[in-house]
Image (cartoon, rainbow, N blue to C red):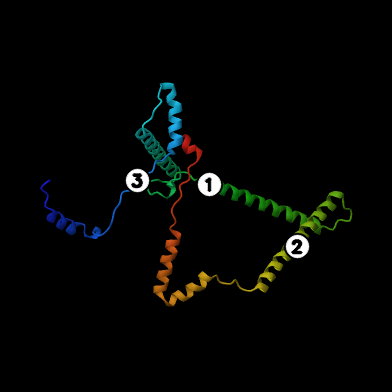
Amino acid sequence: MAEVNLDEVNACILATHSEFVGTLIQSCKEEPFLFIGALQKKILDIGKKHDITELNSDAVNLISYATQERLRGLLEKLTTIAQHRMTVYKESENYILSTDTRSQLKFLEKLDQLEKQKKDLEEKEMLLRAAKSCSNKEDPEQLRLKQKAKDLQQLELAQIQYRDANLTALAAIGPRRKRPLESGNEGFRDNPSASRMSSLTATKTLLRPRITRICLRDLIF
């Protein structure tokens, strides 16, 4: 009726879309995003204020589709916000690090540790000198310093014994056993193809889909 040459159409289809020939494609009925019964009841409850008593099924489907599109757009915006919040600018070549507060705090903490070690060393030397002093007439302060020096020596001796006991226990246990992955790597040295297959498998295992976590702050924004 439309004066279409079916032979030419078939030849064109076989020439351009030959990979789809023989496949059966069916259109599936689109399921509504929201539960129609509950949605229709909700709409009628709201529509009573506006004298709406009947509702067409197309209107319900349209509202369900509009709700789906609204939520999809909202989730896309939330995903963009969350990814922007999680962006690490330190690794970008377009930014230059001007101040590093964490390194500064670590440096100050290291200075405090060195100062504390210096004070501890001076106190230790003072206690050792007090312990070695040979005065016949000892006052209570001298006795207290000697006792403190004795306690300090006992603590150092206990720490040395504890460290030696750990080393002895590790020597008794023996060398660390290699894990199956480590022992398998030695065999891969002689077989490069197996090594490549193993690396590809490990890469596929490590390439997991990245999860974007959205918090309440993103939703409020």
Dot 1 and dot 2 residues touching (CB under 8 Å): no
Crowding at mark 3 (Cα within 10 Å: few <14, some 14-19, many 20+): few
Please name which of the two marks, 1 or 3, marks the residue nearer to the observer: 3
- Tell me the amino acid under the disc marked 1: Arg
C-alpha separation, residue under disc 1 versus residue under disc 2: 36 Å
Residue occupying the far bottom of the picture: 190
According to the image, label 1 marks what residue?
102
> Which amino acid type is marked by label 2?
Ala
Q: CA distance from mark 1 to mark 3?
A: 57 Å
Which amino acid is tagged 3? Lys
Which of the pair 59/173 is nearer the observer? 59
Identify the secondary structure beneath mark 2. helix
Numbered mark located on residue 32 in the image = none
In x, y percent, where is residue 143?
A: 85, 53
Q: Secondary structure at mark 3?
A: loop
Horizontally, residue 195 falls left or right of residue 146, namely left
- Relative placement, left or right, of 63 versus 141 is left
- Whether residues under marks 2 and 3 lie with C-beta atoms below 8 angstroms apart, the answer is no
- Residue 171 position in % (x across, y down): 66, 73
Tell which of 166 and 14 is nearer to you.
14
In the rendered structure, which disc, 1 or 3, sits on the residue that comes first in sequence?
A: 3
Quarter holding the C terminus? top left
What's the distance in space between the residues labelled 2 and 3, CA to CA? 79 Å
Residue at the image point whose x is 45% and y is 45% from the top? 86
Q: Relative to the observer, which residue lies in front, 109 or 56?
A: 56
Which residue is identified by label 3?
A: 29
Residue under the image location 59 percent in, 51 percent down? 110
Tell me where residue 191 sits by quadrant: bottom left
Disc 2: which residue: 158
Mark 2 or mark 3, which has the lower sequence index?
A: 3
- 40 relative position to 120: left or right: left
